[in-house]
Amino acid sequence: MDGNYYIECHAISEMLDAFSFELCPLMGNYAKKTVEVAYEDNITVYDAQYISLAMIKRTHIYKADMNLRKN
């Protein structure tokens, strides 16, 4: 691998750490809501995760996927 590539990846990693992302394992009420949303809206569980997490956190979802915009 190119040395510049390593430096860029390292810099990106540090920038992402600064955002303090919250990890949300698909468990409990989050898993239940995800399955409900997937079934009711006839979408994948993957896509339903974003919607259900936004619902649980009572916030908005911003995703570029045009198929989710109608939900």
Image (spheres, helix red, strand yellow):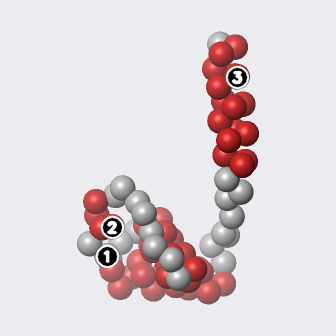
Which disc number belongs to residue 71?
1
Quadrant containing the C terminus is bottom left
Counting every numbered tag in the picture gives 3
Proximity of marks 2 and 1: CB atoms separated by less than 8 Å: yes
Q: Could one spot residue 56 in this view of the protein?
A: yes
Indicate the secondary structure of the residue bearing disc 3: helix
Indicate the secondary structure of the residue bearing disc 1: loop
Residue 62 picture location, percent across and down: 42, 63
**Structural crowding at the residue carrying mark 3, measured as other residues with C-alpha within 10 Å and reported as few (<14), some (14–19) or many (≥20):** few
Q: Which residue position is annotated with label 3?
A: 7
Q: CA distance from mark 1 to mark 3?
A: 40 Å
Q: Quadrant of residue 5?
A: top right
Give the amino acid type for the residue marked by disc 2 in the picture: Leu
Q: Could one spot residue 34 in this view of the protein?
A: no
Left or right, residue 46 beside residue 15: left
Q: Which one is closest to the eye, mark 2 or mark 3?
A: 3
Q: Earlier in the sequence, mark 1 or mark 3?
A: 3
Which disc number belongs to residue 68?
2
Residue 24 picture location, percent across and down: 66, 69
Quadrant containing the N terminus is top right
Residue 41 picture location, percent across and down: 33, 80
Give the amino acid type for the residue marked by disc 3 in the picture: Ile
Give the amino acid type for the residue marked by disc 1 in the picture: Asn
Proximity of marks 2 and 3: CB atoms separated by less than 8 Å: no
Residue in the image at 70% along x and 14% along y:
3
Left or right, residue 53 beside residue 11: left
Question: What residue occupies the far top of the structure in this picture?
Answer: 2
Q: Which one is closest to the eye, mark 1 or mark 3?
A: 3
Proximity of marks 1 and 3: CB atoms separated by less than 8 Å: no
Q: Earlier in the sequence, mark 2 or mark 3?
A: 3
Q: CA distance from mark 2 to mark 3?
A: 36 Å
Residue situated in front as seen by the camera: 67 or 60 = 60
